[in-house]
Amino acid sequence: MDIWSFITNPFVSIYQLIRSLLTSLLGLIGLSGDVASVILFFIMGGLVITVILLVAPLLMMYMTWLERKVVARMQDRVGPNRVGAFGLLQPIADMIKFLTKEDIVPQGVDKPVHLLAPIVVVIPVILSFAVLQFGVGMGAVDLNLSLLFLLAMGSVATIAVFMAGFGSHNKFALIGGMRAAAQIISYEIPQILAVAVIVLLAGTISLNGVIEKQSGLFGLGWYILYLPVGPIAFFIFLLAATAEINRVPFDLPEAESELVAGYHTEYSGMKFGLFYLAEFLNTFIISAVAASIFFGGWQGPFVQQIPALGIAYFFGKTILLIFIQLWFRGTLPRIRVDQLMNFGWKRLVPATLALILFTATFLWAYRLFNQFLTSLGG
Amino acid sequence: MINDIPLVYYLSLSAALFCVGLFGALARRNAIAVLMGIELMLNAVNINFVAFWRYGSVNPILNQAGIVFALFVITVAAAEAAVGLALVISIYRSRDTVNVEEIDLLKW
Amino acid sequence: MIQNFTLFIPVFPLLAFAIIVLLTRRNNRLSAWIAIVGIIMALVLSLGVFLESLAEGPELAQHPFYAAPIVWYPYGLATMNFGWFVDPIGSVMLFMVPTVCLMIFIYSVAYMRHSHVDEQGHHIQEDDPRYSHFFAYISLFTAMMLLLVISSSLLQFFIAWEVMGFCSYALIGFWSFRGLKEHHIDEAQVGRARGASIKAFLVTRVGDILLLTGMILLLLVTGTLDFTQMFNPDGLNNVLLADSPLPGMTWLTLIALLIFGGTVGKSAQFPLHIWLPDAMEGPTPVSALIHAATMVSAGIFLIIRMFPLFVVDSQTGGNAMMWVAIIGAFTAIFAATIGLAQNDIKRVLAYSTISQLGYMLAALGIGAFVAGSFHLIMHAFFKALLFLAAGAVIHSVGTNDMLKMGGLWRKMPITFITFMIGAFALMGIFPFAGFWSKDEILLEALRAGFYGEASPQTQTIRFVYICLAIAAFLTALYTGRQIFLTFFGKPRDEHAYEHAHESPITMWAPLAVLATFTTFLGLWNAPFIGAFTHYIGEGGLMGLPQAFEHTAFDQLAWISMFLSLGIAIGGLIVAYLIYGFRPVAAGQPDPFARLGIIYKVLVNKYWLDELYGYKINLDGTVQRGLLIRFAGALSRGSYWLDRKVIDGLVNLAGWFGRILARLWGWFDARIIDGIVNATASVTGEIAGWWRTMQTGDVQNYALIAAAGAMAFAIIFLLRSFT
Amino acid sequence: MDLIGIISQVVFFLVAALTLAAAFATVLLRNVFHAGLALVGTFFGVAAIYLMLEAEFLAIVQVLIYIGAIAVLILFAIMLTRSLMKNEDSGMNKQWAWAAIAISTLFLGMFIVILQVPWLLNTSVIGTDIVPFLGTELLTTYLLPFEIVSVLLLATLIGAFIIARE
């Protein structure tokens, strides 16, 4: 392990350093074989989980800051500016406030369901972090089915919404929960199909595989540049994903003006904080996934030489996409329920199906053409 | 992993799950609960398919009949759930009940 | 390589037929052009194949152009295929058929325009109302003839054969449509055309059924109808030599005779010749096309195609060939005698056709394969020429009756010259085509009957020779009579004479072309050249490797030549003495009528129509023959028997059954129904008690199913514990 | 038995116990909504079982479809038919005891069969990504069932829509 690779790829190097240190340490106390590998597995796993658990709330906190700042700018305001420089410490203050608030359980709620809901809503989000690829070799797990896994985790969130809505025994919460469920189920389909277009192009369901396929053109061979399929698929994915996580302009389940706060009307304190956390982390995740599959993730110029650049590329692209979503929020009005359903089933689903058909046909024709050229050459 | 857990474990689990599901389908009063029991049974069957695929086939990579079957079962289960629940809701709207014991038009 | 396109030859006329029928029916000119273009393309392709086969030479006979690539249907272990089979004589047919057909097509363009005088007295040229149909039919006809020539199997041959039969029916009856009345074709003619077409169809059907029977037997015995497989002397002919169900006859003889039956019908041999003279009711090009050049040739071609069977039969002691010779020779003389007494210009030609076909069959029957084939080809040319020329005469004079003509040579010289060439060829006058071919047949018969080694057939061959010689004399006689009555002497009908005129060029140009062929083509097999014999005869036939003997150009040949020339000129001189020296005047009866009873017999064609055929009267009515009337009476009698006696018995049985049924009905209603109703009500009681089991609760049913499964589990447990 | 073996067995028993517990809860809980949530738990347990059987793809599909779609549908239906649930005295119908007896006998029979049959086992290591093979097989060997299932889904979509439309 030389110093150059340490500089260019710091996080992976640190991980390997700890791992080798531990191996030799276990060897010193006389453990080896299965026992050592099991212990090593647990320690390293715990380490990675801890890092993720630390990073995730941090990300969420500064996304709240970003949102407040950006939306404030769009509305010609200043945004948080009292706590710390540019209000940078504001999220920490908010967190303290959440943690110290009184935990109210309203009378008449379905208690176990009410208490479990905020936990269930966070778990899939955190799990999703496990398969994200933050940089070169920087994913907790390089699952060969990671895209599918991400979609599955996205769909589990519905259960939590249901639990929140139903467990609260509150009309607003119930209506919000039902709306959320209907919306999530409807928009899951175009989302999955849009991802399927990319899977067709890449020929793999692995997130890392998809990213590596985009290494062409000096690290700029992104799928968004595959005209005309890429931009359309991206557009559909962004719309569907935005609806899937109930953000503006599809935030009907928690529409303040109609439903108070939708399915989490009855929540307060840290439980509300967990819903909040899940929502922001979901935003981050769909932006990260979109950045990965459409904009090449950590791919970019010189990534092969300096792997540390990958982290910068990844976060740069993700934050840009987050900004786009905030931009939506700052500018677009909310749509009606019937419009939402009509748009989903009558526009997005047929459009994505047609897109998939077109892509598959094109790929097939392209392969035939290649075979033809090869046969000419040989 | 595979060496350490015998096939019999999976089969027993599957049998137990199946019987629990069957009980749900036979003894519950709520039509939706009956459907849930059926879903349990389907899951039990799927476990069997996958276990036999993993332990029973000579080449689990090339012969994935078990997984394919399980996939089809899942698909059919989804269809069944959709139609079944649509029926339940329809009955609920017309008869104001989802109690299976009260849905007995075919009675003598 | 052109041979690989052989199967496309019939496609062009067939396509022309389809296009005319489907698309261009309403446009007469275009239809005619399409038909002509179709036949020209077929001609070009045929000539290519012909030239290619000429290049192959006599070897082609043993290794013909053959392929059967189109699988039609499988039967047993073999398949029935479509394909082509071109051997030397087939290739010559490929040259002859489209050439003659093209001439006839071109001729028809003008012929099918009728001229008539309207109320104001103007001459009007008008297309026949079914002008396009005419071209469609003759295109289909030509296509089928070509298909027949190139057929690779007897079944394919038969299909073409039968479609040709249909076409001849449609064309003979071409003018049998009511709507034609306003086009100056009288009702009698419509009736005659209708009767003639039906007669032709029915009479040929007799022969076709014989042929079909022969084919079926052939397929049964040998298992194939493919020519290349059939003419395999080692395999199939041995099978054919087994005894047939008819005593004293091998399968081979039986099948050969049945096939010959097809020829008798198609080529109008005695006793099935009766349809051909009446078939002259069709338009003249049809007569030329069907009844001189192609369709009747198909019958002869069938014998030529199946000739190996006949030869093997005769070598193994069968007598099929003898019958061919006898029927042919008898028909030759028989038809010639009738031809003497006919006044219709086309009917004379029709009887001459029958007679000449008899010649060919006689030649084939005595084994003179090359001479018979050659006469077939030559006859096609000069008979087409004669028919077309006669058609030109009819077209301009407006009548068929020779007694109303006379002195026409001044009015229509070109027609006259071409007709003379054709007539000389028919008579066998040096140096026209007929001379060479007819002389050769006579020479072969003479040589085999009087100078060859004695054999069982010698007597037959002598009879054949004598018949043919007499027929040659008669041929010259009636042809001479025809010429003198038509072209010489004084006009007997001034009106018709005034009306007569030379034909337009589209009509006389084909005549000229055919006349050229008639004049020069005979040299192809002149004894001192012998190219045709070399090409056709030297290779033998498929399955018969030995060559047909080349007729030596010896003393006997000279003798025969002068003899036949003498006979022909003798016949012509007799005709001159009777008809030319003192021409028949208007209104005067035929001098031949002085012979009284003989003339009456001949005019009435030996009363054969009245005996077993249909007599078609001049007024268009049809009179059934004796045998047919007898058969009709017989069937009426049977009908009476059926209605009165058998039906009576049946009705009696029915009445009895009704009585019985009434008894049974009572028994059924009272006793059986009583039992049934009792059972039902008992069952109803029990069921009413049991139906409480039907709870209507799904889960209850499911529980019972589960209990069933549980029962199985208990049984299994008990079994496994014991 | 080595350490990994012990851990595997412990994990299996934990997962199996949780799955069965959730299943029992599904069947026995009086509150249908709670039963539905327990059903979700069962589905998760089955997904974990699939993971242990090295059928990762199926595990994820289980989560995606069973939990993401079927369970949601069921919960949806429960919500729509909610009002009558509140004053329900018992979740079980009249025949539940008979059913319990029959089913326990059935389970006993099955269990004995499972123990008695000498199963032929193949515990070879897979060691490769099997999803591509699965995809190939689905679109070649099982193409016809695949298409039929697609048609079935379409029919279901239309049928469910029509049934529930009033």
Image (cartoon, coloured by chain):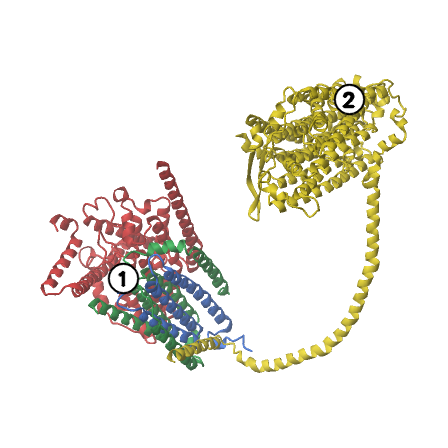
Chain colours: A red, B blue, C yellow, D green
Q: Secondary structure at mark 1?
A: helix
The location of residue A289, given as percent across then percent down, is: 30, 54
- Image position of C96 with respect to A90: above or below: above
**What mark, if any, has residue C623 been given in the picture?**
none
Q: Is residue B19 visible?
A: yes
For residue A119, what is the image quadrant?
A: bottom left
Q: Which residue is mark 2?
A: C567
Q: Position of residue A55 (x, y in %)?
A: 21, 59
Relative horizontal placement of residue C203, taking residue C14 as reference (left or right): right
Q: Is residue C210 placed above or below A270 in the rendered structure?
A: above
**Residue A16 to residue B10: above or below:** above
Q: Secondary structure at mark 2?
A: helix
At 11% from the left edge and 49% from the top edge, which residue is drawn? A3
Name the quadrant containing residue A366. Answer: top left
Is circle 1 on the same chain as circle 2? no
What's the amino acid at mark 1? Leu
Which of D127 and C158 lies nearest the eye of the viewer? C158
The residue identified by callout 1 is A127
Residue type highlighted by circle 2: Ile
